[in-house]
Image (tube, rainbow, N blue to C red):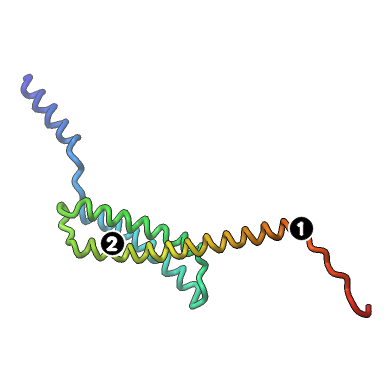
């Protein structure tokens, strides 16, 4: 009776202390779908400008979700590489694409920050100068 309790307790402890094994197919499907949704949002945003200059602040915000989704996908694939048999090439390709996307995001966010700073400086200069008096009309009235 005592042995049964000890064996049962050990089995119970092992079941709850062992790391949960990944369900590769289902997990990858969810992560890839989240990435695809974010990629579609970025692409739709870019298409909306139809060759016109894009708003850097908007692009910065739109690509943040994509970067987060790619981070989650890369982390999952790296962590479960052996268990799920993810090829190194697939992980490396995803990482390379992520680096490019992060570069675009960084540039857009940097430009957006510069534009914001310039607008703030212009507003401060305008406020410091005070209201400008309108010149009196010259010439015949």
- Residue 10 lies, with reference to residue 114, above or below; the image says above
Question: Is the C-beta separation of discs 2 and 1 under 8 Å?
Answer: no
Where the N terminus falls, by quadrant?
top left
The residue lying at 42 percent from left, 66 percent from top is 42
Where the C terminus falls, by quadrant?
bottom right
| Image mark for residue 34 | none
The residue lying at 18 percent from left, 61 percent from top is 88
Q: Position of residue 91 (x, y in %)?
A: 23, 61
| Image mark for residue 95 | 2
Front residue of 51 and 104: 104
- Residue 18 lies, with reference to residue 45, above or below; the image says above
Helix, strand or loop at mark 2: helix
Question: Which residue occupies the extreme bottom position in the image?
Answer: 140
- State the separation of the CA atoms marked 2 and 1: 52 Å
| Image mark for residue 130 | 1
Question: Which residue occupies the extreme top position in the image?
Answer: 2
């Amino acid at each position: 009776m005592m042995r049964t309790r000890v064996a049962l307790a050990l089995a119970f402890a092992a079941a709850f202390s062992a790391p949960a094994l990944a369900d590769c197919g289902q997990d990858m499907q969810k992560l890839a779908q989240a990435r695809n949704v974010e990629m579609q949002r970025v692409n739709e945003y870019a298409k909306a400008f139809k060759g016109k200059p894009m708003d850097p602040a908007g692009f910065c915000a739109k690509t943040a979700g994509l970067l987060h989704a790619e981070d989650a996908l890369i982390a999952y694939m790296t962590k479960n590489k052996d268990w799920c048999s993810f090829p190194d090439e697939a992980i490396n390709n995803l990482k390379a694409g992520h680096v490019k996307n992060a570069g675009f995001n960084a540039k857009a966010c940097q430009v957006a920050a510069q534009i914001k700073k310039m607008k703030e400086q212009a507003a401060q200069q305008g406020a410091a100068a005070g209201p400008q008096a309108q010149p009196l009309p010259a010439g015949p009235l």
